[in-house]
Amino acid sequence: MSSLRSTLEDLLGKLSEENYDESFAQYCFWLNIGSAHGHILSKDQVSDNLRRIARPDDLKNQKLIRPTAHLLIRFIGDMEADQKISKYVLGFHKHHCTSGLYRFFEENISLVRSTDVYGSRTSSFLTDVNLIAHWINLGHVEEEVIRDRILQSLVYHPKLHNHQADALTILFKLAGATFAAYADAPVVSRCFELLKSHINYDPVKRKLIQVSAPQTLRGAIGLSRIFRR
């Protein structure tokens, strides 16, 4: 691999709130050079770079809220606003959201059928859940999917599995207001009932998150919750 491509990957692999502006400026500078002189030949290369911002291996010690997921969303948006490099991220939000939803539904069922306990597959699944929550808030997920599929797929079985409980925690933490606006009250109530029951049998998760049942207020769903990271 060329040193220029490695530099681009390193910039995004080390991206943080503190160095965001500087890293974004450097990435754009080297990307412009790379695209002009044959180092960057396709959008796929940029897409591979961007995946380094929200890597699954950062999800450990049950830190469910992915600390850099929002930076991936922000980075793509800022690149879209830059006329010189916007062509490299054209349609990225839609493409990555569609791919993330595909993996979400597939991996949810696959993890139910497996014995993977906080392994690499679970970490990847929860990383996708973080990103999906942000895309939900930005309007990149269709209303039908929010209303009829995402929550239902996590509580379809009588037993709530660990990865499903974690996924619900992330979704309500990051996109609770959106689910309150679109999801049916009985579905949300079932989510919180299963979550409460699941947490009661898990002292670690009980310390991590405390959730109260939703209340119906003036026809809307009020999600009253206290999250502990």
Image (cartoon, grey):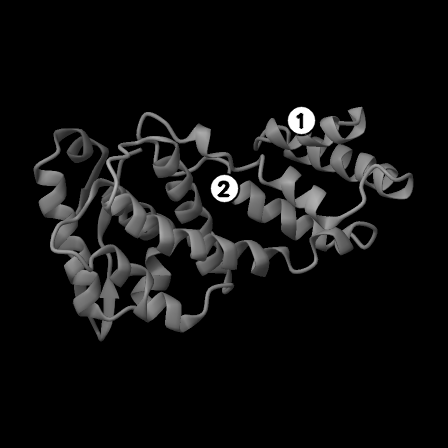
Q: Quadrant of the N terminus?
A: top right
In this picture, residue 126 sits left or right of residue 72:
left
In this picture, residue 103 sits left or right of residue 37:
left
Q: Residue at x 74, y 51 (%)?
A: 88
Mark 2 belongs to which amino acid? Answer: Ala
- Can residue 176 be seen here? The reply is yes
Query: Mark 1, residues whose alpha carbon is within 10 Å: few (<14), some, or many (≥20)?
Result: some
Residue matched to label 1: 10
Foreground: 14 or 55? 55
In this picture, residue 120 sits left or right of residue 88:
left
Residue matched to label 2: 69
Query: Mark 2, residues whose alpha carbon is within 10 Å: few (<14), some, or many (≥20)?
Result: many
User: Residue 181 at x, y = what percent?
Assistant: 33, 69
Disc 2 from disc 1: Cα separation:
17 Å
Mark nearer the N terminus (2 vs 1) = 1
Q: Quadrant of the C terminus?
A: top left
Q: Residue at x 64, y 29 (%)?
A: 19
Extreme-right residue of the structure: 37
Whether residue 221 is situated above or below residue 223 in the rendered picture: below
Extreme-bottom residue of the structure: 219
User: Residue 70 at x, y = what percent?
Assistant: 51, 44
Q: In the picture, residue 179 is in which quadrant?
A: bottom left
Q: In the picture, residue 142 is in which quadrant?
A: bottom left
Whether residue 28 is situated above or below residue 216 in the rendered picture: above
**In this view, the mark in front (2 or 1):** 1
User: Residue 216 at x, y = what percent?
Assistant: 18, 68
Foreground: 150 or 214? 150
Mark 1 belongs to which amino acid? Answer: Asp
